[in-house]
Image (cartoon, helix red, strand yellow):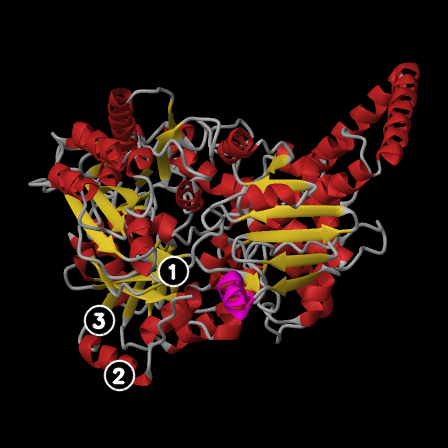
Amino acid sequence: MIHRKFSKSDFLMMQDAHSHHKQVIFTIADADYAAMAMIMFDSVSKHYQDSDLFLFVIGTGNVNQLDNNVNVIYIGDVLDELDLHQRLVYYLQVELATSIKPQCFEFLFAQHYNRVIYLDPDIYVVRRMTEIDSLLDGNVNGVVTPHALKSLKSNIIGEDNVFLQCGIYNLGFLALKNTPETLRMMTWWKEKLKWQCIVDLRNGYFVDQKWLDFLPAYFEGFHVLKSPAYNLAPWNSEHYEVLSDSYGNFYINDFEHPIAFIHFSGIKRAVYHYAFLKEARMYYLEQLKKYKFKKFGFLRFEIRYKLDNMKLDKICTFLYKEYINHTKNTSTDPFTDIDFYNFLNSVDTETKLPVYVRKLFEILPDIFVGYLNTKQTINYDNLITWMKNNFNYDGVVSLETMVHLRNNSIGSNYKIKYTDASIKTSFQGDSGKPSYFPSLLSFAKEIIVKSDRIEIFDGDVRVCIPNIDNLKDFTDIKTKNYTELWVPSFNCKKKLHEKYGLTNITVIPFPVLQPKYKVQKIDFPINKFVVLMHHDFDRDFTAQKSLESLMAFQEGFDDRDDGLLICFFINAKQSEDYKKLLAACQNRKNIKIIENKTKDDLYYSYLHYADCFISMHDQAAFGYELNEAMSLGKYVITIRNDDNKAYINPNNSFLIETSSSHSYITTGAKMLNEIYDNNNALCKTRRLAALTTEKHLSPNIIGFMMQKRLELLKLEVKKSKLNIYMKLKQITAYLFLAKNKNNQDEINQIETIMKILLKNVNRPDVLE
């Protein structure tokens, strides 16, 4: 984790540097909202040259300043470590971002700023907020703006109840003055938001907003600015005619009433909300295009239980809320709290289900109904298998987490032996456990790790995982009479069969580890469309087809100056292949060559800033670089074949379905242009790319696949028992079908009741 703490001297230097500045404007954002934040700061800087600008980042990084002299502060510099860990586990992203707002205000007040204005990152400032200037010049301590000044008229009985749920004031804007009364309010607000900045409409919570409904009653000197020119948004624009001129200014009803700022909430998600702001929306989307390829050196927090590296997903977040509410234990670190860990691994006393599964069904009851239709016993193994193939709630539930909890419930009894110490050192991951088997092979009795293979023994079953790179001759493996070989791709299986006559082969992919890296400061423009290609000169030059990838970029971007190709060369050698690539890059300003000995932080920094990863390799053993890029949410362009693309499909990547080098180049160029032209519309592709690798190729999932394969092999060895098992299974299925035919009315009634219950389920208001 990249972490940068401010020292006391840093604080004093900032205070000295900024003590003469009276006003500061800030926002809070993660990497996903950083571009919107920059648009907001662009609009602010036109009218507030006298104000300092701050971006508080939910994440880590080493960037200290952005365009328009925007100062960057990481929330780890504002919160102490325990507070940060608690919030990361307790809150969803939108809850987290709003829960730290008081701390950000206090941080800036400590820098001797007299006035602090908060704006949401999706706000666009059209003019200077002169009314706010006048109010803060007076005796007020702060200014808030209501969601609306009139009842909504889109329904004959009104829809003001939405404001009863979300709060009277919209805290996308909040202006505060550094006074004793403001600091008193801040102390009260901060205490409320530590554990109660949640979205729970049924119980009256809506992040930070609902609490400030108490503002006029509990505190003095806070002004409610009732002007339609402030916080114009989709939820209140139906009351006004919004006009515009040719200079990007907007007005309410006539050109005598200029709008101060517009709140473009849900700009990408809910187009129909902008029926009364169509022109303003189009203008804002044009502004966003300026930053559509802007990359930031920000990394997300990694939320894992430290003792055994278990990922804490959003189901764990809801369980941590439950744990805190039940135990009232607000002083321990959830990253190390053994009691919380034991709670995650416990069984619910009422339902007899693992608490994780019980919470999963509470949060996403549709999963429960869908799973019941499979007519399988509710247990981790059946549920994981079903969700892997039929599950659509990715991003909320992590199968990696579920497999981890499943393994804990089983326990492990395998032993690992290494043939020498050097193999052990290179083979083990950060957690001290083998990186290839993070999901414990609890059914295996013994695992032996050699330089050229891994051997798994369990009774009469003997499995070999050959190291394709180190193993030059498979004759020895053939004589060992292994029960089965596990290889990472169909291409490997095909080659081993053709060359050595091996038939006992099963394809189990390599696990894809999302890379851990520190973003390096690299010298290249990060506001362009960046394409990365990778070539290792120790591997087959012809098969990698690096020239085709390079020429596809040239064909697609010869007439565009805002594209950049990074050619990252590993183990570069003076050879004819090397000269060919250099010649193809010669005198090309939009191509940058990087030479390095290995894939390290430098490589991953370029991958971090890249928009797209391109590889025309059509004979890869597995295509690890492709899946690695997908795990980071990059667009991937590659060749479709039966080899390394088991989980790469047209929904999460761009596949070239052709067989000639010329077609590779032409089709690749068209795909690059499509991504360039439709970046916003294709964001779902990037998201699906990351979710696919987590769902199907994470280490825990691959380990689970290995376990299930071992179970099946043990059954196949005992053929007579297997035959009996299959017959019993068929008889059971026939009986079940017969019962269904005779009780169809009862089945229909049960399904109807389930649908009724679903309508009244207490599902969370926010899942993200």
Tag 3 near tag 2, CB within 8 Å: no
Q: Give the camera-side residue of 465 and 499.
A: 499
Left or right: 160 in relation to 347: left
Residue 90 at x, y percent in the picture: 58, 61
At label 1, which amino acid type do we have? Tyr
Precedes in sequence: disc 2 or disc 1:
2
Residue 433 at x, y percent in the picture: 59, 63
Q: Is residue 609 visible?
A: yes
At label 3, which amino acid type do we have? Lys
Closer to us: mark 2 or mark 1? 1
Q: Is residue 83 above or below residue 461?
A: below
Residue 634 at x, y percent in the picture: 37, 41
At label 2, which amino acid type do we have? Leu
Other residues around mark 1 within 10 Å, as few (<14) / some (14–19) / many (≥20) = some
Precedes in sequence: disc 3 or disc 2:
2
Instruction: State the mark number for residue 22.
Output: 3
Q: Residue at x 41, y 32 (%)?
A: 653
**Quarter occupied by the N terminus:** bottom left
Q: Is residue 149 above or below residue 177?
A: above
How far apart are labels 2 and 1 at the CA level?
31 Å
**SS at mark 1 in the image:** loop
Residue 316 at x, y percent in the picture: 63, 56
Region of the chain picked out in magenta, as a range: 420-431
Q: Give the camera-side residue of 194 and 56.
A: 56
Q: Is residue 204 visible?
A: no
Q: Is residue 627 magenta?
A: no
**SS at mark 3 in the image:** loop
Picture quadrant where residue 598 is located:
bottom left
Q: Residue at x 19, y 41 (%)?
A: 564
How far apart are labels 3 and 2 at the CA level?
17 Å
| Residue annotated with mark 1 | 517
| Residue annotated with mark 2 | 12
